[in-house]
Image (cartoon, rainbow, N blue to C red):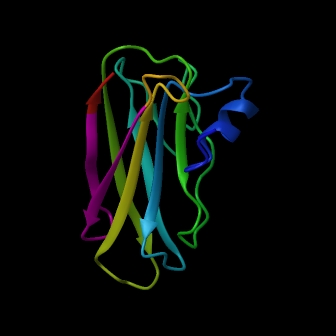
Amino acid sequence: MNKSCYFNEFMMGQGFDSSIISCCLFCYPKFFCTVIDLHVITRNGEHAWYGQRVIPSGGAIDQDAANDGSAPQIFATHSGMRGTYQVYINYYYNSGKKDHITGRLTVITDENTPREKQQSYTVQLLKQGELVLAKSFLY
């Protein structure tokens, strides 16, 4: 069972054995009171983010990460509608006023199947308030 970003625990809590599409976001280095937010736009235009954690097609962001930068933000869906997905990172806040931080995004598709694919991306975030397209992918 893949434990890298707690995807399975989240999906099992939703009544599913595994997710079809999962996105996990961490902030590096971990700074107290640094907030970066995960935004996922599905192929039909639904937008999951901290202001709308659950979307009608069944996807959800399981938590709004702790403000110490240590907890991941995780989006997962069991519906797996075919099409293009866009994953954004919003460098929302940093009380330390440090400008440059790094977001680490992992995208997993078809988890716990022979077709499972896992890819990680490093995204440089240069200033607070910035919204960056971290990854666009076709599922």
Query: Compared with residue 20, is residue 9 higher up or lower down, i.e. above or below?
Result: below
Please report the residue visible at 63 percent of the width from the left and 49 percent of the height from the top.
63
Please report the residue visible at 44 percent of the width from the left and 36 percent of the height from the top.
108
Image x and y of residue 23, in percent:
46, 41
Name the magenta segment's main secondary structure.
Answer: strand
Instruction: Residue 127: name its quadrant.
Output: bottom left
Query: Compared with residue 89, is residue 11 higher up or lower down, i.e. above or below?
Result: above
Please report the residue visible at 33 percent of the width from the left and 46 percent of the height from the top.
88
Image x and y of residue 130, in percent:
28, 60
Q: Was residue 92 drawn as part of the magenta stretch in this picture?
A: no
Please report the residue visible at 42 percent of the width from the left and 14 percent of the height from the top.
81
Furthest residue to the front? 114
Answer left or right for 104 relative to 60. Answer: left
Q: Was residue 120 drawn as part of the magenta stretch in this picture?
A: yes
Answer left or right for 99 relative to 12. Answer: left
Image x and y of residue 91, in percent:
36, 62
Answer left or right for 10 relative to 21. Answer: right
Q: Is residue 51 visible?
A: no
Depth check, front residue: 110 or 105: 110
Report the span colored magenta.
117-136
Q: Is residue 64 visible?
A: yes
